[in-house]
Image (cartoon, rainbow, N blue to C red):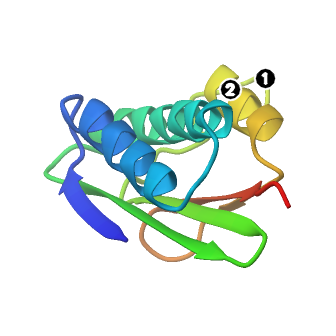
Amino acid sequence: MKLVLPAEPASVPKLRHRISRFATEHDVGSELVADIALAVSEAVTNAVKYAQAAGGKSVVELSAEREAEWLEVTVRDQGEAFGRESIDGLGLGLSIIARLAGDLRIVQEGDGTEVRMRFPLPA
């Protein structure tokens, strides 16, 4: 699954609903669906925030796939301001994502930032 929307506040609920539907379609339990939706909301909110700080038009990209025992989700933005405003390490949103996801990686290469999240699926 892949969806690209403008990096604007209205995209947050749209992407949250899309990942919820994707997870539900892949037989993920309702509690884990809620955790994934919250993590995606936090990641997209950060993407919107930092895209706006960088100025200009930008997009946020959500992609997801089921890989055996994991649901893998990536939120990518084109902003350049990620991490420049925070003086206390991970912000609240990333701390929430780190608590919810089984694995979290933040990749800053080239244009933008990727937040890669993996959620373990029950056996």
Residue nearer the viewer, 22 or 80:
22
Q: Is residue 82 above or below residue 78?
A: above
**Percent of width and height locating residue 16:** 38, 38
Q: In the rendered structure, which amino acid carries the disc numbered 2?
A: Gly
Q: Is 120 left or right of 24, judged from the image as shown? A: right
Q: Is residue 53 visible?
A: no
Check if mark 1's residue and mark 2's residue have beta carbons within 8 Å: yes
Image quadrant assignment for residue 114: bottom right
**Percent of width and height locating residue 79:** 38, 53
Q: Please name the residue that numbered disc 2 is placed on.
A: 91
Q: At x 64% / y 42%, what residue is drawn? A: 29
Q: At x 24% / y 62%, what residue is drawn? A: 4
Q: Please name the residue that numbered disc 1 is placed on.
A: 88
Q: Is residue 120 above or below residue 86?
A: below
Q: Is residue 95 visible?
A: yes
Q: In the rendered structure, which amino acid carries the disc numbered 1?
A: Asp
Assign the C terminus to one quadrant of the image. Answer: bottom right
Looking at the rendered image, the disc whose residue lies closer to the viewer, 1 or 2, is: 2
Residue nearer the viewer, 117 or 70:
70
Image quadrant assignment for residue 111: bottom left
Q: At x 57% / y 30%, what residue is drawn? A: 34
